[in-house]
Amino acid sequence: MNKIGFSSMTKILDKYEIDETKQKRISREWQDYAYRLALALDDVAHTAIYMRIVKSNPRELVERAKSFVMDAGARSKGKMFMWKLKQIKEEIVERKIRMDSPLRVPAADSSPE
């Protein structure tokens, strides 16, 4: 009883080629996400790096960097992902600095009239 335009969960999950030997060591959701990220970036050799990134960064930032890389179609997806994630973090810090700085009000003329 599938609706038009929807796929069953089994069909969606069958698209992923998962190495069962690595999958056995995954016990947390973020670990699974990091492994799938490494697969998407064709960089399974550096799965541990992606685990650290996913664990220590907000998911929104990781998703934005991943989306950028997937849309760009880069040859070295892992390098571009790292670069974009760093750029996103820098933008956030810069925006926070601008928001925290006090507004500059022109100095009032202190001479009595």
Image (tube, rainbow, N blue to C red):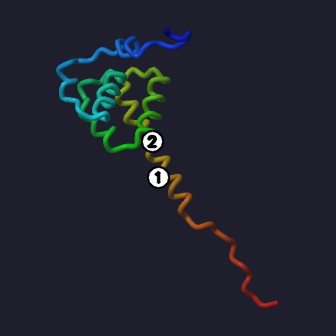
> What residue did someone put label 2 on?
87
Task: Locate residue 52, reporting x and y percent.
Answer: 28, 39
Q: Quadrant of residue 36?
A: top left
Q: Is residue 36 visible?
A: yes
Residue at image point 29% right, 24% down: 43
Q: Please give the residue where the numbered disc 1 appears in the rendered image.
A: 93
> Which of 38 and 109 lies nearest the eye of the viewer?
38
Q: Which amino acid type is marked by label 2?
A: Gln
Q: Secondary structure at mark 1?
A: helix
Residue 50 appears in the picture as rendered = no
Which callout, 1 or 2, points at the residue further toward the start of the chain? 2
Taking the view exactly as shown, the residue that stands out farthest to the bottom is: 112
Q: Secondary structure at mark 2?
A: helix
Measuring from the top left, give residue 29's x and y in whole percent: 31, 33
At a point 40% along the width and 30% down the height, the residue shown is 80
Q: Say which residue appears at 67% left-offset and 71% top-offset.
A: 105
Given the image, on which type of amino acid does mark 1 rest? Val
Q: CA distance from mark 1 to mark 2?
A: 10 Å
Vertical arrangement, residue 110 with respect to residue 19, above or below: below
Q: In the visual, does 82 lie left or right of 20?
A: right
**Image location of residue 45, percent across then percent down:** 23, 25
